[in-house]
Amino acid sequence: MNRKSCNPGFRRCGVFVLLLLLIPSRVLALEIHEIRWSFHDRPVAYQFNPVTLLVENNQATPFEGELRFHPESFRGQSLGLTLARRIYISPYEKKWVQFYPYFTESNANWSVVWEETGRQKSKSFLAPVPTHERATVQLVSVGSLERLLPGIKQYPEEIFPPFSATTGSLESVVLNHVPKWDKARRTAFLEWIYSGGTVHLFKNASGNALVFSESFAPLNQMSNVISYGKGQIFRHQIKMDQLSSAQLSSMLRTIQQNPEQPFDVDEKLADAYSYDPTQGYYPHAGFLHSNMSDEEILTTLTEMSKPQRIWYFNFFISFLYLVVVGPGYYIVTRLSQKAYHYYVCYFLGTALFSLIFLISGKYSSNQTAQVHSLFLANVLPNQEIELSEWSSLGIVNGGTYEILHLGDEHLYAACNEFSRINGISTSGSQGMLKIEMPPNSTQSFLHKAKTRKTVFEVAVESVLTNESGLEALTLKINDQFPSQVKQIYFQIGPKLYELKQEEERLVYHGTSRKISTVLDYSLRNAADSLTTFRLTGTVKPRETPDKLPLDQLFPVLLKRALGIDSDLTGSKQQSNVSTGKLLVLCDAPDELVLQSPQVTNKNGLVLYCLEVPLKIQID
């Protein structure tokens, strides 16, 4: 074939392709270089997890706008709650941006969305499958060349989350230097330890013991083992380089072993899963009841708060409408030969039943927006309350609702990644949940926060113990002690000691109960209030969920307050008799419940938890 006879169209095509290659492509204003899922690159199920993005501004002008982070289906449809955060990035700079989503056991695509020049841009990421094992990480500084420990991920200290509520996915930390943190991160780190975290301190690269500033006061003690709240700090008198990988891993596994269980759970667990076919339910499912997950708690609250309709009246009106439309109109046409009689009856009947259905739909249910809430309030050493809230909002009139709370460090979650929710959540001191709700609907949510509202103090006046436990105890309370108290307990080891309020004191009069008995209480003594699904064994309200008292959910709060894990191991149960835990159950005050003028009926139950150091007198 003669080369000169080559089709000139191919030449023009080649020139066109060359020109396209020479034209520079447009660069996005924002570029996401890296994403870190939680602390060890896998989110932990049923926890708020920090998800950190490394974002770069590729433009010569600053970027100021909103990033949105939300789960989506594999078809690209938005699912769950959208997390939003406003950011500012200088020209040609990189910045870590952190979101705090709540994960269940399923993974999903997560999309980051922002706007550039009036157009929406996005980038999707596939989340790893969540794990149930909390993370053990080694905190490293910027540019550090620390030794990589086998089986332990390195985590940059600069992106340690500033909110203590987001550290629930963290089990323990290995540290051989003093972190350079701002106040928010220092506070979050200490509160994480106080809530049950474990820290392993090694000597620094120079072979010197770590010396912390006054703001890290609990870490400055030189004992080999330091207890701080429910957490522990281990000081190792060696450098990490002096241990082999096998020795280091073995030592960490030994230290992290769970302590003895406060009660025998194997027998209770076997009873809980035993189904009685004659009764048609699980008669000993108290442990399953107290072991409810976040989603199950919210489902139970939803049954209480959803609008209750008079369905039998609506069904009767529907049946009557069918009778009128069918035989009724037929009789009209037979009795009258004039066509306009039929049309008059048709339009009058349609208008009448439309009005009846409108009135029935509006007035056959409760007409006030209502919320049912459970609160767990852990009192911290700095006189702040770490608040966990499970709430369900039931409304009659649809619209946009803003869910606001007093306090700081707000986090919100719907706890259901696969439900379509038209809502946006922001975190931090100005955090809120803004959501679109249709008429006669409910929306449940999980809320974490810190607040100084309703905090109180107690002091030990007298205490006496013997071999069997607590014999006498008197606590002095201040003016901020809660009102409308339902129950007061003092926990030491496997027992709960009932206290009575006498003016400005709480006094023990000899009544005590085992923790296992209280956790197994609900379905034994309130079988008329709750029942279980035959296939799954999960707990649900019976036929009258609107009359179910919130008090029946006290074992759920108690189990979480004592730190008993979902697998019933009791891994965070305090065995140290030098401290006890004061548990106060009462109606939720207005300062804790959501602040919304649209919601007038508020029902809440709160369990306050306060660590109390004891001066033991042995007989």
Image (cartoon, rainbow, N blue to C red):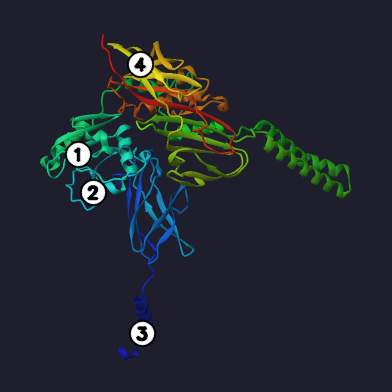
Q: Give SS at disc 1.
A: loop
User: Given the image, on which type of amino acid does mark 2 rest?
Assistant: Ser
The mark nearer the N terminus, 2 or 4, is: 2
Name the residue: 46% across, 32% down.
453
Q: Give SS at disc 2.
A: loop
Q: Is 14 left or right of 144, judged from the image as shown? A: right
Q: Residues within 10 Å of mark 3 (few under 14, many from 20)?
A: few
Question: Which residue carries the number 1 mark?
Answer: 211
User: Given the image, on which type of amino acid does mark 3 rest?
Assistant: Arg
Question: Which residue carries the number 3 mark?
Answer: 11
Of 298 and 168, which appears nearest the observer? 168
Question: Which residue carries the number 2 mark?
Answer: 141
Q: Is 353 left or right of 216, judged from the image as shown? A: right
Q: Which mark is residue 310?
A: none
What is the spatial separation of the Cα atoms under label 1 and label 4, in whole angstroms?
36 Å
Q: Position of residue 537 (x, y in %)?
A: 44, 28
User: Given the image, on which type of amino acid does mark 1 rest?
Assistant: Val
What is the spatial separation of the Cα atoms under label 1 and label 3, in whole angstroms?
73 Å
- The picture quadrant where one finds residue 47 is top left
- The picture quadrant where one finds residue 106 is top left
For the image, the number of numbered tags is 4
Question: Which residue carries the number 4 mark?
Answer: 461
The mark nearer the N terminus, 1 or 3, is: 3
The mark nearer the N terminus, 3 or 4, is: 3
Q: Quadrant of the N terminus?
A: bottom left
Name the residue: 41% across, 16% down.
506
User: Given the image, on which type of amino acid does mark 4 rest?
Assistant: Glu
